Image (tube, rainbow, N blue to C red):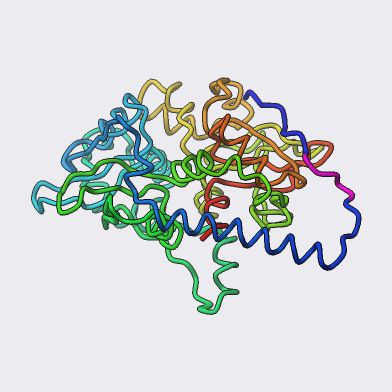
């Protein structure tokens, strides 16, 4: 897997102790930055993050799930809304990772994967065994820990987008869209035309972050604190990692269990970063000749799969690193260049100490 050069730290790791007045001033500036983006999100509607041109793929729930997966890959899309012709309404969302998870189910249960070729999307989503296991969504532990410390003390609950369709009106504010994404632990949020049944697009945290960066990347003083000091990201023992000798099936199970979309891959001996593996990576599928071969490939190690991955650093799931000393502003600048889905935080000898996702960056301002 290709890596990009780490960001160059913009602050010294040894800052002199500052007078209390200066600390109060920094807190004021920090709050001003959060308020500025909060106000901005509330003043913008969902139209503002939609591209001038684009396409939306919608699946009839009667089509075979394998055909739907190949259509997603062909159109280079991660997700598509599901339309039920009997009910004449949208009923959910299908993603690339859903198909991968269904293959995991077949491996776990030993069911005949040949039958998958004839099963429709509706068949799969009506299968309680699949829905309640590999397609049951988990909320990342970080966000449940944060929520338990809040006044409500309640755990976040991930909406099952396979059996319900949660969307947002295109005229709704970005603040509303961000809260839906975060509070319901969604990865994709369909945007609908007002008083219509048409889906304009699906938005993600990366879409929102791109819009924020394009509007605030010049306001350096507002975002001059480090991501670590701001508490943006996951650090220490909370970081989930994978090892090169683990099988793909083991790693995908870990990602599903922790509600994660990707995991840093580290050397088991040195603990240094080796790469990053995304749950939506379809390398093992492209190397398969049929469904049986695809299920068999779940036994491949990450070492083998990572040697076969794309090496284009512009892909959102390529490895990008930073340190705990990087400011929020420098991360904004880096995102403007690479449009990453996450940054792996490393120390001076490239050992993983944290992960900062696009969700973490957007959630900070909510």
Q: Nearer the viewer, residue 69 or 32?
A: 32
Residue at 55% x, 30% y: name it.
300
Q: Nearer the viewer, residue 35 or 79?
A: 35
**Could you tell me residue 290's position as x and y percent?**
35, 24
The answer to which image quadrant residue 319 occupies is top right
Residue at 71% x, 46% y: name it.
327
* Direction from residue 105 to residue 354 in the image, left or right: right
**Could you tell me residue 31's position as x and y percent?**
63, 62
* Direction from residue 334 to residue 40 in the image, left or right: left
Q: How many marks?
A: 0
Q: In the rendered image, which quarter contains the N terminus?
A: top right
Please tell me whether residue 155 is drawn above or below residue 237 in the rendered image.
below
Residue at 74% x, 62% y: name it.
25
Q: Nearer the viewer, residue 83 or 177?
A: 177
Indicate whether residue 11 is drawn in magenta. yes
Q: Nearer the viewer, residue 30 or 343?
A: 30
**Could you tell me residue 240's position as x and y percent?**
64, 50
* Direction from residue 197 to residue 185 in the image, left or right: right
Do we see residue 257 in this rendering? no
Indicate whether residue 240 is drawn in magenta. no
The answer to which image quadrant residue 365 occupies is bottom right
Please tell me whether residue 295 is drawn above or below residue 45 in the rendered image.
above
**Could you tell me residue 46's position as x and y percent?**
34, 48
Magenta span: 10-14
Residue at 66% x, 37% y: name it.
265
Do we see residue 31 in this rendering? yes
**Magenta: main secondary structure:** loop
């Amino acid at each position: 897997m290709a890596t990009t050069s780490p960001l160059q730290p913009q602050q010294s790791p040894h800052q002199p102790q500052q007078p209390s007045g200066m600390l109060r001033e920094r807190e004021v500036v920090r709050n001003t930055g959060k308020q500025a983006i909060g106000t901005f999100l509330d003043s913008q509607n969902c139209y503002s993050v939609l591209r001038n041109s684009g396409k939306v793929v919608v699946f009839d729930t009667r089509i075979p799930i394998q055909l739907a997966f190949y259509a997603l890959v062909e159109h280079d899309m991660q997700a598509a809304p599901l339309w039920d012709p009997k009910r004449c309404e949208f009923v959910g969302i299908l993603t690339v990772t859903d198909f991968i998870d269904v293959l995991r189910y077949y491996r776990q249960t030993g069911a005949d994967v040949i039958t998958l070729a004839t099963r429709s999307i509706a068949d799969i989503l009506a299968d309680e065994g699949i829905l309640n296991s590999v397609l049951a969504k988990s909320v990342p532990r970080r966000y449940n820990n944060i929520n338990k410390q809040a006044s409500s003390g309640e755990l976040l609950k991930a909406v099952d987008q396979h059996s319900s369709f949660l969307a947002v009106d295109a005229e709704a504010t970005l603040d509303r869209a961000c809260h839906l994404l975060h509070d319901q632990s969604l990865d994709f949020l369909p945007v609908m035309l007002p008083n219509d049944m048409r889906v304009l697009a699906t938005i993600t945290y990366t879409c929102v972050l791109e819009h924020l960066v394009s509007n605030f990347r010049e306001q350096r003083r507002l975002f001059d604190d480090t991501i670590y000091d701001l508490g943006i990201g996951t650090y220490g023992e909370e970081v989930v990692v994978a090892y090169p000798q683990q099988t793909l099936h083991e790693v995908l199970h870990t990602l599903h269990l922790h509600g994660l979309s990707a995991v840093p891959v580290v050397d088991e001996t040195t603990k240094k970063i080796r790469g990053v593996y995304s749950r939506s990576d379809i390398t093992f599928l492209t190397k398969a000749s049929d469904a049986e071969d695809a299920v068999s490939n779940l036994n491949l190690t990450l070492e083998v799969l990572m040697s076969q991955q794309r090496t284009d650093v512009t892909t959102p799931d390529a490895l990008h690193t930073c340190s705990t000393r990087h400011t929020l502003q420098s991360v904004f600048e880096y995102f403007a260049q690479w449009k990453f889905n996450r940054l792996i935080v490393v120390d001076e000898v490239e050992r993983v100490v944290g992960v900062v996702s696009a969700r973490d960056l957007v959630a900070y301002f909510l």
